[in-house]
Image (cartoon, rainbow, N blue to C red):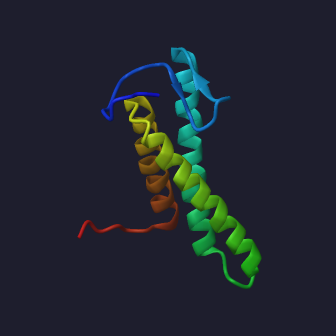
Amino acid sequence: MNQPPVFHFGATETILFDLWKIDCGLTMVLSMAVILIVSCVKEFLRVYRSVLPESKMNAAGSLFLFAIQTFLGFSLMAIFMLLNVWLCLAVVIGEVFSNLIVGIATKQRYELC
């Protein structure tokens, strides 16, 4: 894979594993939808872990959820590092959308500074 490290548009990509290949526009759109869902799951796990009282979950359960959240985060980072514009947009939109939904649901306010 001698690919220059620049952002590129394209509908042919291998994402994370050899079995997840994009070879046409339809598989690109489906992959973008999966990436959006993964972004939302990662954010919801983060909030679930922080909102859930410690009495309801033992340390092993919290650790397991943290491991899943971390794995999903690193997977999204690896997808972004493919530098495919469409996949990068899916990651960013998924993170922003899920953060917006979680912010509305939990009434969190984020400050820029």
Task: Tell me if 111 is positioned left or right of 103 in this view.
Answer: left
Q: Position of residue 38 (x, y in %)?
A: 59, 46
Q: Which residue sits at x=40%, y=31%? A: 84
Q: Position of residue 1 (x, y in %)?
A: 47, 28
- Displayed quadrant of residue 10: top left
Most extreme residue toward the bottom is: 55
Most extreme residue toward the front is: 2
Q: Residue 4 versus residue 47: which sits nearer the camera?
A: 4
Q: Is residue 66 above or below residue 92?
A: below
Q: Which residue sits at x=43%, y=42%? A: 80
Q: Position of residue 105 (x, y in %)?
A: 52, 61
Q: Position of residue 23 (x, y in %)?
A: 55, 16
Number of marks in the rendered image: 0
Q: Which residue sits at x=37%, y=31%? A: 85
Q: Residue 56 versus residue 81: which sits nearer the camera?
A: 81
Residue 57 shows in the view: no
Most extreme residue toward the top is: 24
Q: Which residue sits at x=74%, y=85%? A: 55
- Displayed quadrant of residue 4: top left
Figure quadrant of the C terminus:
bottom left
Q: Is residue 11 above or below residue 103?
A: above
Residue 37 shows in the view: yes
Q: Residue 94 versus residue 6: which sits nearer the camera?
A: 6
- Displayed quadrant of residue 35: top right
Q: Residue 13 versus residue 52: which sits nearer the camera?
A: 13
